[in-house]
Amino acid sequence: MSHLLFDLPIPAVPIVGEDALYPVRRVFCVARNYASHAREMGGDPSRDPPFYFTKPANALVPGGGDIPYPPATANFHHEVELVVALGAPLFQASAEQAARAIFGHAVGFDLTRRDLQLAARDKSRPWDLGKSFEDSAPISPLVRADAPITQAAIALTVNGEVRQHGDIDDTTCRSTTTSASATSSSPAPRKGLGRWRSATNWSAPSPASASCGRPSSRRSSTCRHPGDPGRRR
């Protein structure tokens, strides 16, 4: 009989007010879903549709805490995100089916080694080294939901200074539309997370906090550069 050589931990996210954990299989991210960020990255939000990349489940940092400054980068960026958790598998789903499959929401950070991402982009190579690395996806506890969030303020502060602020309604495509689109060519399993970009990009490896208009979904995280914890890049 076959058996695993060793056990692997299952990445899981806390649920507000519950002892249960939400296990995560993979993380879909939609890129350039906010007009200002699309223009910042050289795109045209009126012409270019959003597209997708993924992060491994072990990139998650549930509940906050200190994370190390990643190696091989001098340009470490953060973006605050609305995170959507699915409670049912989806494949070639409609927006209505995607809305019914939503389990809950959280606030997350998309951390990026921007210099590595741009170097890969300029050579038409995958973004994995820039986007998909350990501790690149801090996330707050999940808040259960019966319907998708369509309007809610989302903001990020660094050392008390507001660096990002917007509304979920500012996104180019709603979470249900992007969830349905992402399942057109690949099944989205239950235990999957989607991160929908909702604010412009800044870099700051220093204390930061994010909220989604609900005290129950607050979290904090610190990104430190070895030997220089206060420097912004």
Image: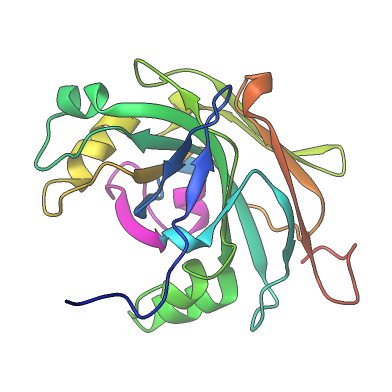
At horizontal 53% and vertical 78% (from top left) the residue drawn is 116
Q: Residue at x 66, y 67 (%)?
A: 76
Vertical arrangement, residue 88 with respect to residue 71, above or below: above
Which range is magenta? 37-55
Percent of width and height locating residue 99: 25, 23
Q: Name the image quarter holding the C terminus.
A: bottom right
Residue 118: x %, y % from top left: 49, 74
Across the whole image, how many numbered discs are drawn on residues?
Answer: 0
Q: Residue furthest front?
A: 1
> Does residue 130 belong to the magenta stretch?
no
Residue 126 falls in image quadrant: bottom left
Left or right: residue 90 versus residue 164 is: left
Query: Where does the N terminus fall, quadrant-wise?
Result: bottom left
Tell which of 225 and 31 is nearer to you. 225
Whole-percent x, y for residue 94 in the image:
12, 30
The answer to whether one can see residue 164 in this image is yes
Q: Which residue occupies 59% across, 63% down?
A: 135
Query: Foreground: 203 or 66?
Result: 66
Q: Foreground residue, 15 or 158? A: 15
Does the magenta portion include 48? yes
